[in-house]
Amino acid sequence: MNWLTNVVRPKIRSILKRETPENLWIKCPDSGQLVFYKDVEQNQFVIPGSNYHMRMGATARLKSIFDNETWYDVALPEVTPDPLKFRDERKYADRIKDARAKTGMNDAVKVGYGKLEGNAVVVAVQDFDFMGGSLGMAAGEAVVKGLELAVEKKSPFIIFAASGGARMQEGILSLMQMPRTTVAIQMLREIGQPYIVVLTNPTTGGVTASYAMLGDVQIAEPGALIGFAGARVIEQTIREKLPEGFQRAEYLKEHGMVDMVVHRHDLRATLARLCRLLTKAPAAEGFEARTAPLPVDLPASASPA
């Protein structure tokens, strides 16, 4: 009996055991409904039914924007990974290593160059999964590099902002990225190319205080949290109760802080139309969104994604 209990039964269980992925189901933060991860992924990370917009990784975002889901990764400048040798509960260098292993990214911003409905564009995406999308030296260099490439190629620049603010572990060096990116945006404006910002959930802190609110057109995704300081801090400072939905995309649109709130399914077409209008580029005749060729005038630092 011991042989049947201790040997045969465990072996049968091991054969019948099925590995269940940890992310098989996703719970909607808004409605609480459970949905299959694959269904959400195929729906551009929008929960079917509630239309709640989940966070979207940098690679998935670039795929959703560029023609044929194909672009060229722009090589980004190397920076000192831990300039202040910062340490709190853990070493800052160890936190960076963990974030890189988790996301597969070098830092919080990824930059791509490709075509959007036939017209060349540069797109930068902040990934909130990389240390809260915080703005440090590497992220600032990535944004500046993307803007410089847009100036070089005389193409529009689109940025998807998602951040908790400046990265405290880099101190004043992270804060200096705010004026640096602002100067680079002015360079793009001087050649007459559009700078379009898409505010995603959440966009706060020093990012909101700099390049995230300097767009020629300010777009926000539905329900996105957008602001500088948190609502509780503001209430404690002014000693007043804030309105319902304060700092949400819809409230900001009603009060003139953003130009439009666009559902993620309509975002690609909206961005393509804005780029054509602002650059006076003709619409591509008979254009097929998934078969358009890549730009041929590639920067020397770019590599296929």
Image: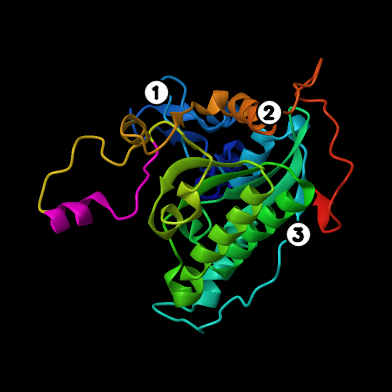
Of residues 206 and 201, the one nearer the viewer is: 206
Secondary element under disc 1, as helix, strand or loop, is loop
Q: Nearer the viewer, residue 167 or 197?
A: 197
Q: Measured from the top left, where is residue 269 in percent x and y?
A: 62, 24
Q: Left or right: 161 with respect to 206?
A: right
Q: Which residue is mark 1?
A: 50
Image coords of residue 25 (percent x, y): 48, 34
Tag 1: residue type? Ser
Residue named by callout 3: 75
In the rendered view, would you say 206 is above or below 126?
below
Q: Give the residue at mark 2.
A: 276
Left or right for 114, reference 140:
right
Q: Is residue 196 above or below residue 111?
A: above
Q: In the rendered structure, which disc, 1 or 2, sits on the residue that comes first in sequence?
A: 1
| Callout 2 secondary element | helix
Q: CA distance from mark 3 to mark 2?
A: 27 Å
Q: Amino acid at mark 2?
A: Arg
> Where, by quadrant of the figure, is residue 237 drawn?
bottom left
Residues 208 and 182: in front is: 182
The amino acid type, in three-letter code, at marker 3 is Ala
Give percent across and percent down for residue 305: 78, 47
Which residue is drawn at the image coordinates 51% and 75% (left, top)? 173
Q: Residues within 10 Å of mark 1 (few under 14, many from 20)?
A: few
Mark 1–mark 3 distance (CA, rounded to whole Å): 38 Å
Image-based side of 94 in relation to 142, left or right: left
Residue drawn at (49%, 29%), measured in percent from left and top? Answer: 46
Q: Which mark is nearer the camera, 1 or 3? A: 3
Task: Magenta stretch: give its range.
Answer: 224-238
Residue at 68% x, 54% y is: 146
